[in-house]
């Protein structure tokens, strides 16, 4: 199984950096697991586009694109 590189769009990167440290550590670990299989881990396609995905990683909802890397474009957490 190939491993994808994680890349964050600027708004997603900013949201990630504002997370409390414990949440960010758990989120980063979950993202590494997602990088091994970005089409798995309970993710779902967005608008019937298989490479445009949404998933929940450790209580954090993300939206991302899969190409030669996983590009996270949105992060929502409370």
Image (cartoon, rainbow, N blue to C red):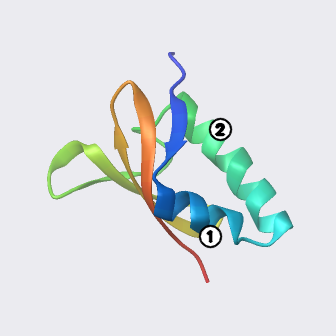
Label 1: element kind = loop
In this orientation, which residue lies closer to the viewer: 77 or 33?
Answer: 77
Residue 34: quarter of image:
top right
| Picture residue at 56% right of the left edge, 29% below the top | 36
Q: Are marks 2 and 1 in contact (CB under 8 Å)?
A: no
Q: Is residue 71 left or right of residue 52?
A: right
Q: For label 2, count other residues whose C-alpha is less than 10 Å away and answer few (under 14), some (14-19) or many (20+).
A: some
Q: Is residue 39 left or right of residue 61?
A: left
Residue highlighted by disc 2: 32
In this orientation, which residue lies closer to the viewer: 53 or 17?
Answer: 17
Q: Given the current orientation, which residue lies at the most extreme bottom position? A: 78
| Picture residue at 85% right of the left edge, 65% below the top | 22
- Numbered mark located on residue 69 in the image: none
Q: CA distance from mark 2 to mark 1?
A: 15 Å
- Numbered mark located on residue 59 in the image: 1
Quadrant of the snapshot with the C terminus = bottom right
């Amino acid at each position: 199984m190939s491993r994808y590189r994680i890349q964050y769009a600027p708004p997603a990167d900013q949201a990630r950096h504002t997370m409390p440290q414990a949440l960010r550590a758990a989120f980063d670990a979950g993202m590494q697991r997602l990088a091994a299989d970005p089409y798995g881990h309970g993710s779902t396609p967005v608008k019937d586009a298989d490479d445009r995905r949404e998933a929940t990683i450790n209580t954090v909802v993300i939206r991302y694109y899969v190409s030669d890397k996983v590009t996270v474009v949105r992060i929502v957490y409370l």
